[in-house]
Amino acid sequence: MNKSLCAGALVLALSSFSSQADTLLGVYAGAQAWDMETTGGFSDSNSNVDFNFEDETKGSFYVALEHPVPLIPNIKLQRTGLDTNGETLLSSSMTYDGELFSANTSVNTSLDLVSTDYIAYYELFDNDLVSFDLGVNAKHLDGDIYVEAQNDATQNAAQDFSGFVPMLYSRVAVGVPFTGLGAYLEGSFLAFDDNTISDYQAAVTYGLLDNIAIDATLQLGYRQLKMELDDLDGIYTDFEFSGAFVGVEVHF
């Protein structure tokens, strides 16, 4: 009888510790495969030229750390590759990095770009039915754009650029009780002078695994990233990256 009582107390203690640990510290990690379509263009002046780009399947990875300490924000780090290539017949002449490309010239274009989000946020409301987060996002863009004439490989130009863009961040999630189904809308936004950046994703979710040690959730959604930048490290852009994604998130 005493052994049974001790075993029961041990189980209760372990369950209580696990529950408190999850309350004190939560780690979320996720990965997404994004069917990305790229449209728009760029320049090194304020007259952007549109280019054709190939559709790509890109990866996005993130990790978030949540805690109950007052006034100290939760943090999230997300990294997304946005590189793509394309071929374009120029409808008008353009100068890029001091190189003149004449109208009716066929060019190969390579965009090598990485977006890294450094997010600090607060959980203003959080339960099994509805949660709402609000914070700020320091989005770091690091890229290189290369242009080469197809009929003359010696005619080429390249420019790299890098910089931080401060943005507002928010996330709203809802759950359907006893089904494992849910949905969320997450995004960052900035509009200042001639700079406008928005990065939104919406998804439906389904709980694949839910136990004391780990939760796993499947995501199916759509993401759109727009970048209208006016002189970020000498580069002007009007890009839009969009498409459906599938992902998995685990919660420790």
Image (cartoon, rainbow, N blue to C red):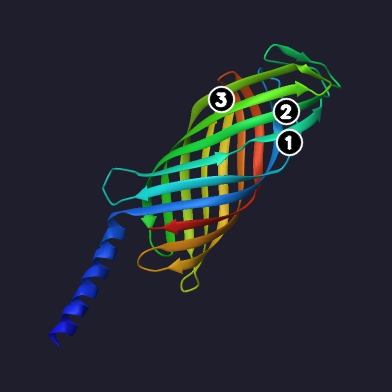
Foreground pick, 171 / 210? 210
Residue at 15 percent across and 88 percent down: it is 1
Residue 115 percent location from the top left of the image:
54, 36
178 left or right of 242 in image: left
Residue 113 percent location from the top left of the image:
59, 32
Type of amino acid at the residue the image marks with label 2: Thr
* Residue placed under numbered mark 1 in the picture: 53
Residue 150 percent location from the top left of the image:
81, 24
Q: Are marks 2 and 3 in contact (CB under 8 Å)?
A: no
Foreground pick, 235 / 87? 87
Q: Residue 193: give its label.
A: 3
Residue density around tag 2, few if under 14, some if 14–19, many if 20 or more, within 10 Å: many
7 left or right of 246 in image: left
Q: Nearer the viewer, mark 3 or mark 1?
A: 1
* Residue placed under numbered mark 2 in the picture: 109
Badge 1 marks a residue whose secondary structure is loop
